[in-house]
Amino acid sequence: MEKYKFTDRQIEIMEAATLRIDKSGIQELTIKNLASDLNLSEAALYRHFKSKNEILLGLLTYFIFEMKERIAAIMAKEDKTPTEQLKEIFASQLKTFIKKPSIVSVIFAEGIFQFNKELSEKVSTMMELMHTHISSIIKKGQKDGSYRELIGAATISTIIMGSMRMTVLKWKLSGHKSNLIKEGNTVLNGLLKMIEK
């Protein structure tokens, strides 16, 4: 797997960008504001990233790479049941969101990305990556008789992802006050009861 290389300074800039988005909204992410947040000159910031879009692209690329590594490690555990793998993947995602809540603000800003092809493609890549893995786990469960086959794996994956996305959005809108892990587990367990034999 190709490792995306970012300098420590670039990572610092991307983290500052996510904090700025989380606190004030993506429209407040400007090179001027970011340079001020980091006590840098705008010229110094431009040495690391050419534009705001390049920062956002880097941020999404970094998150996707980190997500791929986490999911690959879970998928490699072939002794786990499909249900155990699904629970572990979502626990991993939710814990990452709790650890870095500002990344949720970036991921949920895709409406603003719709006019930027590169950023839209990054968000699509992230969603497709998750959808592909969840679908393969559902197929495995349908094949071994753990899950019902009334609905296709791709549709079940979309339902699970949509439900979890709604749970994360509610947590974001609560100002991160609700218990994301507890609510996520409740939703996932409810969905699994619907598909388990």
Image (cartoon, helix red, strand yellow):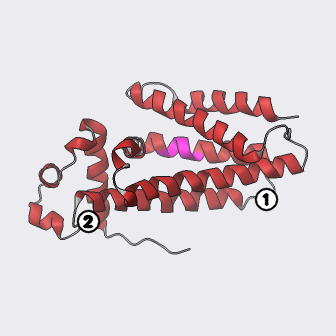
Position of 177 relative to 195 (above/below): above
Residue 155 is left or right of residue 165, and the answer is right
Magenta extent: 92-96
Comparing 185 with 47, the one in front is: 47
Compare marks 2 and 1 and give the one earlier in the sequence: 2
Which quadrant does the C terminus fall into?
top right
Identify the residue at horizontal 72%, vertical 40% (top origin). 156
Residue type (three-letter) at the residue carrying disc 2: Arg
Is residue 90 a member of the stretch shown in magenta?
no
Q: In this figure, which residue is indicated by the disc labeled 1?
A: 78
Residue type (three-letter) at the residue carrying disc 1: Glu
Q: In this figure, which residue is indicated by the disc labeled 2?
A: 9
Where residue 43 sits, quadrant-wise, is bottom left
Identify the residue at horizontal 38%, vertical 61% (top origin). 118
> Badge 1 local density, few (<14 within 10 Å), some, or many (20+)?
few
**Magenta span: chief secondary structure:** helix
Where residue 101 sits, quadrant-wise, is top left
Alpha carbon separation for disc pair 2 and 1: 38 Å
- x, y (%) of residue 162? 59, 36
Where residue 12 sits, quadrant-wise, is bottom left
Is residue 94 a member of the stretch shown in magenta?
yes
Identify the residue at horizontal 68%, vertical 43% (top origin). 157
